[in-house]
Amino acid sequence: MFRTKLLSSCIFPALLAAPAFAQDAGACGQPIALTQKLPTALSPDFAEVTLVTRPVRSEPAYVEFEVTEPTELTLQTLGRGIDTVLALYAADGSLISWDDDGAGDLDAQIGTTLQPGTYCAQSRLLGGEPTSDAMVIVLASPGLPPDPLAAENEAIAATCADPNLTPVLAEGIAGGETQSVTGTIGSSGSQSYRVGVDAPVGLRIDAGSAEIDTFLTVRDASGALLFENDDHAEMPGTDSRIAESFEPGEYCVTVAPYSEGSGSFTLEVSAESASGAEVAQGVRIPEAGDGAAIEELGTLETALESKTLDRARTLWTAFDVTAEGPVTIEGVSVTSSFTLRLFTETGELVQEEISSGSLASAEFVAELATGRYLVGLTNDDASDGLKMRQIKLRN
């Protein structure tokens, strides 16, 4: 079974620092002596570009190019066994994207859509002793690379749509309803069930077994992974739990062993009330006693910031306002893009902002009356790894 692998980008800043501006710098601030320039600007349906670069262990190589119209393109390195990192910079020196082994065999790949402007692709070598004879080919092709998960998602969707392979566990599940089933995982290695949702609702999905280490996933009707969990802190032993908000639609819930093994399991799906503070804007607002972690920041006087590092998809903080006025809400994440939302204590959405930038961040200013407020930072990445992020508040 596919496992989402979450890598923290905090280990890469030294490798992918922005080009240093100098007197003989290129358009992105990179050393002009290390730069090749494409003679022809890129636009949709451009002819594939192949360039030979010679980065060394201590110095990268750059390709500077112009884009005249909004253009989808794929950049890729071909290092013939050399481990390369590929980074893409804008004209102001800001990092747009980077990749290490996305093309396989130690080669890197970036697929993106660029607006008109000047850009620089940086290829850099990883590891090993200093060398000056490495040759890395940089390819630029029109269009975005194929989604590597598309075939897998399509196969999973077909399995979930087959009633012989994926029985219905719950149809139109609503507040207060609980459905459960006992199953056995054999040679197939997993068992899936369909759950239908007719209205926004918070679902708690538990998978438990005395014989296997359960691994729980939820996918949408297209097979795309939405949520996953291995060992949940609120569950005994190696049992799994997913507690999230669900919009109307069909979902595929799968139980599998985290590693090899077979045995029996119990799967339970419980729906909580979709009214009041429990589901708002697609995010389930936590309440006392429901097991959700809320970091209490106290009263906002000058500035507050969260300290929690956890695995939950949404990082929750709460704070009190004792004097009316503007409050700046800021969120930062190095693991995923996200949506930052501010709620009243009763679950009313005050304001929200979608993150942007290579180091995902979002910020807005809200005029607040006195009272208690909750801030939720919800990652787009649904994987189950430790999420490195922070919520900051200031007057």
Image (cartoon, rainbow, N blue to C red):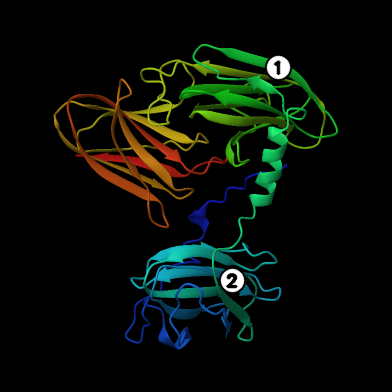
Identify the residue at image location x=45%, y=50%. 334
Quadrant in the picture for residue 275: top left
Q: Position of residue 182 (x, y in %)?
A: 74, 17
Amino acid on which disc 1 is placed: Val
Residue that sits furthest to the left in the current view: 324
316 relative to 84 in the view: left or right: left
User: Looking at the image, is 228 positioned above or below residue 58?
Assistant: above
The label number, if any, that marks residue 181 in the structure image: 1
Name the quarter where the C terminus is drawn.
top left
319 relative to 384 in the view: left or right: left
User: Looking at the image, is 303 positioned above or below residue 142?
Assistant: above
Residue that sits furthest to the top in the current view: 176
The label number, if any, that marks residue 233 in the structure image: none
User: Looking at the image, is 17 positioned above or below residue 11?
Assistant: below
Q: CA distance from mark 1 to mark 2?
A: 47 Å
Quadrant in the picture for residue 187: top right
Q: Residues within 10 Å of mark 2 (few under 14, many from 20)?
A: many
SS under mark 2: strand
SS under mark 1: strand
Which one is in front, 162 or 36?
162
Residue corresponding to mark 2: 76
Q: Position of residue 42 (x, y in %)?
A: 45, 77
Which one is in front, 179 or 229?
179
Amino acid on which disc 2 is placed: Gln
Q: Position of residue 283 (x, y in %)?
A: 42, 30
Identify the residue at image location x=64%, y=76%. 129
Q: Residues within 10 Å of mark 1 (few under 14, many from 20)?
A: few
Name the quarter where the N terminus is drawn.
top right
Q: Earlier in the sequence, mark 1 or mark 2?
A: 2
User: Looking at the image, is 60 positioned above or below residue 323?
Assistant: below
Quadrant in the picture for residue 234: top right
Which one is in front, 52 or 321?
52
